[in-house]
Image (cartoon, rainbow, N blue to C red):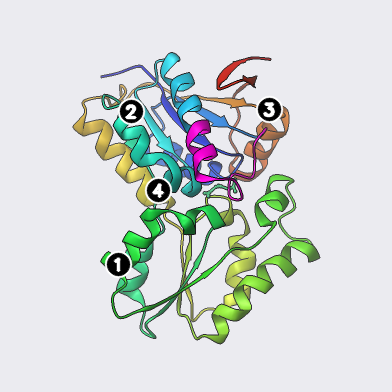
Amino acid sequence: MSMRAIGLFDSGIGGLSILREIRRLLPHEDVLYFADQAHVPYGRRSMRQIRAFSVGITRFLLDRQVKLIVLACNTASAAALHHLRATFPDTPFVGMEPAVKPAAERTITGRIGVLATSATFQGKMYASLLERFAEGKIVLQQTPHGLVERIEKGDLDSLETRAILQQSIAPLLKQNIDALVLACTHYPFVSNLIAEMVGPAVIVIDPADGVARWTERLLEQCELSGPPDHVGSVTFLSTGDVHHLGSMAQRLIGETGERLEFRWDGDQLVSK
Ligand code: DGL
C-alpha cells in the first residue's frame, strides 16, 4: 500500500478528461494534476521544447514524491514518453498514443480519421502505430487548428468552435471514414459536437477509460496501489491561472481541490 499521490500532467485542461476516468476507477488515490498553462498549446511547439517541459514537470512531480506519472497529453507522450522512461528508469509512466489499433479493428469501410495536434503526428510514435496496426487501412489525419485554445477558454460550443471542427471533419466524412480517433485529451470536451457532426455511422474513440485501467494495472504490478478505504483528493497545480483551471475542473468533471500556482525559472518550477 502506498499513500503517495499519482502525478498527472497536460499542457492545460485536456488532462481533465483522463482525470475524470482515473477518479471514477481509483477514487481512493490522491492525484496531483499539473497543467503547464504558461505554455499551452504544446501542439505547435517543437518536439525538443515539449520534451524539455516534460522533463521539468517530471522532476517537479518526483520532488513531490509521486509514485507514478500519467502523461495525460498525447502531444507530450509523442515528444517525451520514450525519453522520460530512459531518464527516470525507476518511475512508472503511463503515456498515451492515438487509438489507431482499436479503430483499425472496428472499421468496416477501412477508412479511419485521426484528430490530433501537429506535434503528435510528427512523432515517431505515430508512424510506428500506422506501421504496426493500420496495414491495409486508409488513415486520414486532421489537426483542428485553434481548437485547444478555444477549449482552454471554456468555449465548447460557439460558432467559431463549430467552424474549426467542421473544417477538420468535413474532409474526413467525404472520404467515407467510419471510425474517428480523438488523439488529443482536450477533444473529448467537444465530443457532443463531434458526434453531432459525424452522425451515428461513425464510431468516435476516446481512449480515456483505457488509460485509467492501465494506470490501475501498473499500480498493482508495482505494488503501489493506495489503501482502498482512503478517500482520495485532487490538488490542482498550474503555471497559469490556477483558479481558471479549478473552475474548469468543477464545470467539466465536477472535481474540486486545493489550488497552487507555480512559474518556470529556466527549466525549473518554483512557487509563484
Ligand atoms: N491535450 C494535449 C494533447 O493531448 C495537448 C494540447 C496542446 O497543448 O496543444 O495532445
Residue 117 visible here: no
On the image, the x and y values in percent for residue 40 come to 64, 41
Front: mark 2 or 4? 2
Which element type, helix, strand or loop, lies under badge 4? loop
Label located before the other in sequence (3 or 1): 1
Tag 2: amino acid? Thr
Q: Is residue 45 magenta?
A: yes
What's the residue at 39%, 59% (across, down)? 126
At mark 2, the secondary structure is helix
Q: Residue at x 32, y 45 (%)?
A: 213
User: How far, Cα to Cα, is label 3 from label 2?
Assistant: 29 Å
Inter-mark Cα distance, 2 to 4: 18 Å
Tell which circle, 2 or 4, labels the residue nearer the N-terminal end: 2
Choose the circle earlier in sequence order: 1 or 2: 2
Nearest the viewer among 82 and 151 is: 82
**Mark 1–mark 4 contact, CB under 8 Å?**
no
Indicate left or right for 215 with 241 as reference. Answer: left
Read off the residue under disc 3: 242
How far apart are labels 3 and 1 at the CA level?
40 Å
Which residue is under mark 2? 87
Q: Nearer the viewer, mark 1 or mark 4?
A: 1
Please name the residue shown 60% across and 54% down the image.
Answer: 189
* Residue 96 numbered tag: 4
The residues bearing labels 4 and 3 have C-alpha atoms spaced at a distance of 24 Å
